[in-house]
Every structure is written in C-alpha cells, then in structure tokens.
Image: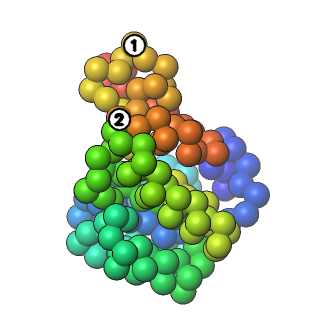
C-alpha cells in the first residue's frame, strides 16, 4: 500500500502510535476509517498504541520508558501526536527544544525507526511559508528530514 495513497513504501512493518489528545475509542474509529478508505483490513495492520495517560520527553523516566518500548516492539514507524503534549519546556527556546529533538534522533538512529512528529502552526500563519508557520523554535523545522505541511482552506 502506498503512503498517503501516492508514495511508494520501501519498508513496511509495525507502527507505534502515541495519540496524546484522543481517547482510544476515537483513535480506533479514525484508524478504521483510514483503513476502509484505503481498502486495507484494520485487524491485520501491526499498529500498537501507547496507552499511557502522558508521555513527557523532557523527563528521564518517560524517555527511558519510550526507549524500552521501542526496543521491545521494534516498530519501523513511531508517530507522536502532537508535540505540544510531549513536553513542558519552552518551545520557543531552541536549546530546550534541541534536547527533545536530539533524543528522538537518537531513537531513530539506534533502532532504525522513522519518527513522525506532529506539530501545530501558529494561529496567525496563513501568509507564512509552511516551515516558518510552525509554532516555537525553528529547530523544529530544521530537525525534519522530510516535512509535510497541511493547511485548512475553508472547510477543506
């Protein structure tokens, strides 16, 4: 199956998802809807959901727990959604954000896992170029190997 029904996937495998803002029931319905639209069988997909009530990448204990989970499950993709719920640091301070992003890069390299980090744009960003519209430090834009930006246009 193609990524976003368009881009070829070179390596498929297990996915580990931390949906910080939605209940498990909402996440399940959303994943089932995506599968139905793509013509995939939801039950056959290797998706694991982190059910912890919080995951704070600015705490050593939570970084250790996430590392242990990635090590044991060996996902090919780790999705963290959204960034704002993963820390309590000042996201405008590059030095504080760099620590979190360095940890994620270490996970990526150590375990060969692709990391998708969902982040929000500033509310007043409609006239900005996508990378400039991100909330917080420019470290976030620079960290990504590939970045996908989406904007709402009216009801779309």
- Residue 59 in picture, x, y percent from top left: 32, 70
Location of residue 118 in the rendering, given as x and y in whole percent from the top left corner:
42, 48
| Image quadrant where residue 63 sits | bottom left
Q: Kindly tell me whether residue 44 is visible in this rendering.
A: no
Residue 113 percent location from the top left of the image: 62, 66
The foreground one among 135 and 13 is 135
Q: Which residue is mark 1?
A: 127
Q: Is residue 37 above or below residue 19?
A: above
Which disc, if any, is residue 135? 2
Instruction: Label 2, secondary structure: give it.
Output: loop
Would you say 42 lies left or right of 13 here? Answer: left
Q: Is residue 15 left or right of residue 151?
A: right
Look at 66% across and 56% down and name the residue there: 1
Give the residue displayed 32% in from the left and 59% down from the top.
Answer: 86
Say above or below: 48 vs 83.
Answer: below
Residue 13 versus residue 29: which sits nearer the camera? 13
Tags 1 and 2 touching, CB below 8 Å: no
Disc 1 element: loop
Count how many numbered circles sit on residues in the image.
2
């Amino acid at each position: 199956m193609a990524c976003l029904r368009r881009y070829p996937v070179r390596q498929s495998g297990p996915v580990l998802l931390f949906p910080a803002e939605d209940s498990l029931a909402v996440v399940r319905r959303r994943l089932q809807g995506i599968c139905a639209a793509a013509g995939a069988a939801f039950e056959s997909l290797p998706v694991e959901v982190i059910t912890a009530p919080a995951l704070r990448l600015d705490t050593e204990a939570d970084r250790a727990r996430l590392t242990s989970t990635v090590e044991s499950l060996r996902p090919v993709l780790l999705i963290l959604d959204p960034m704002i719920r993963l820390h309590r640091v000042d996201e405008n301070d590059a030095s504080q954000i760099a620590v979190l992003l360095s940890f994620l890069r270490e996970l990526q390299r150590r375990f060969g896992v692709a990391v998708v980090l969902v982040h929000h744009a500033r509310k007043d960003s409609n006239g900005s170029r996508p990378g400039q519209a991100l909330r917080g430090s420019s470290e976030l834009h620079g960290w990504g190997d590939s970045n996908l930006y989406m904007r709402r246009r009216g009801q779309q």
